Image (spheres, rainbow, N blue to C red):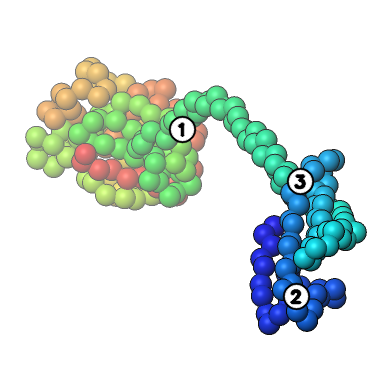
Amino acid sequence: MVFKQKRTGTYYRYGRVRSNVLKRRPGKRPVKLLALAVAILLCTGGGITYAVTSVDVHHNTVPTTHAAKTAAVSRPVQATPATTPTPAATPTQTTTTTAKPVTASQPKPATASAPQTACSSNTDAKLLLISINQQHLWACTGTTVSYESAVTTGAYQITGDATPTGTWHIFGKQTNIHLTGPGYDYPVQYWMPFYQDYGFHDSSWQTFPYGSPQYATDGSHGCVHLPADTATWVYNWAPVGTTVTIQQS
């Protein structure tokens, strides 16, 4: 703290207006000595004390000591700002995802489609299908092959003996009869006509294998020759009205 001394008129003021102002006496030169005693800074337990002694001395007089003013000014101790502790970093919780083992999908077995057969496209309840080129017969129950066998068709290299192609129906059934024509008379056990005088029958006199390409010259007069066991099976399986389809391929 700094005390400033100011002068105004004929009296003195120290920091503030004093009530004990010395007026000039007639015939004497007032001298006002201000003895500013040593301001003793006593730092005791956080308190600061100032001791001020003021003495007025006049000519030819003994200094009068004013009562020392002792002001105990408690100086506030500036508190050192408390250091805010830095909060410890909260550890980040790391979520560990356990990878699930990838299970290789097992390939599904391929569903085998039903193989195409001679009866796959059939729409009739019963069908007798004959291929001239393959010299073969298929008995179809719907789209199912119920029976199949090698056959012999007409000797197409001889005029008038080729087997006709197309679709017809069995219109009769007979057993143990003779089939006669120009130059022939054949006893048969089963006879099943499907178009004019063309039909199915057994042929006990045939000497070459059924299904053989020899049919071109040594085949039937246009009918479809069946092996004995095939003739028996077809006669029992196919009623009158059964569809008959003969194709070249």
Measured as percent of width and height from the top left, residue 143 is found at 44, 41
Q: Answer few, some or many: residues within 10 Å of disc 2's Cα (few below 14, many 20 plus, some between 14 and 19).
A: few
- Checking the image for residue 41, the label placed there is 3
Is residue 57 positioned above or below 6 on the image?
A: above
Q: Amino acid at mark 1?
A: Thr
Q: Amino acid at mark 2?
A: Lys
Using the numbered discs, state the Cα–Cα distance from disc 3 to disc 2 in whole angstroms. Answer: 38 Å
Using the numbered discs, state the Cα–Cα distance from disc 3 to disc 1 in whole angstroms. Answer: 109 Å
Task: Residue at 43% x, 50% y: name it.
Answer: 123
Measured as percent of width and height from the top left, residue 173 is found at 44, 41
Q: Which residue is mark 2?
A: 28
Give the mark nearest the N terminus, 3 or 1.
Answer: 3
- Checking the image for residue 111, the label placed there is 1
Q: Quadrant of residue 99?
A: top right
Task: Residue at 23% x, 31% y: name it.
Answer: 134
Is residue 67 positioned above or below 159 on the image?
A: below
Using the numbered discs, state the Cα–Cα distance from disc 1 to disc 2 in whole angstroms. Answer: 142 Å
Q: What secondary structure is found at the residue carrying circle 3?
A: loop
- Checking the image for residue 103, the label placed there is none
Q: Is residue 106 left or right of residue 41?
A: left
Task: Residue at 40% x, 46% y: name it.
Answer: 122
Give the mark nearest the N terminus, 3 or 2.
Answer: 2
Q: Amino acid at mark 3?
A: Leu
Q: Nearer the viewer, mark 3 or mark 2?
A: 2
Front residue of 166/90: it is 90
The reply to whether discs 1 and 2 touch (Cβ–Cβ < 8 Å) is no
> What is the quadrant of the N terminus in the image?
bottom right
Q: Nearer the viewer, mark 3 or mark 1?
A: 3
